[in-house]
Image (cartoon, rainbow, N blue to C red):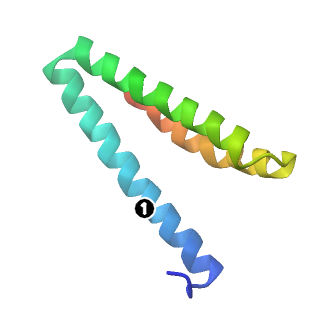
Amino acid sequence: MTDMTPIADDTAATLTFGLLRDAYLDLAQTLLRIEQGSARDLLQAIEKRAALRLSALEDEIFTDPLEQTALAMAASPVLAVLREAQAA
């Protein structure tokens, strides 16, 4: 993938995110139908772990304010999917 053009990279990322988003939401809905309480606990734990990971990245790797802004922008749609799964 390293020799792909930036447009192809963006397209691949968009496609991947869309597919994984749909799969995660389908999985969340299935788990919620099977056992709502345990599923909600699991989904909340996943969201918390993602937030902790983003915080660690910000503290350890993305220390420049511009990098932190880019990380926040990238994380926003991911966190939105995690919240959407819990609302299902």
- List x then y, in percent, for residue 59: 72, 38
- The kind of residue on which mark 1 rests is Thr
Residue furthest top in the image: 37
- List x then y, in percent, for residue 43: 36, 25
Secondary-structure class at tag 1: helix
- List x then y, in percent, for residue 3: 56, 88
Pointer 1 residue:
16
Q: Nearer the viewer, residue 27 or 44?
A: 44
Q: Which residue occupies 77% across, 45% down?
A: 68
The image quadrant of residue 75 is top right
Q: Nearer the viewer, residue 16 or 67?
A: 67
Q: Which residue occupies 40% across, 47% down?
A: 21
* Image height of 55 relative to 1, above or below: above
Q: Which residue occupies 33% across, 16% down?
A: 41
Q: Which residue occupies 26% across, 30% down?
A: 29
* Image height of 44 relative to 14, above or below: above
Count of numbered badges drawn on the protein: 1
Residue furthest right in the image: 65
The C terminus - image quarter: top left
**Crowding at mark 1 (Cα within 10 Å: few <14, some 14-19, many 20+):** few
* Image height of 37 relative to 10, above or below: above
- List x then y, in percent, for residue 19: 36, 56
The image quadrant of residue 42 is top left
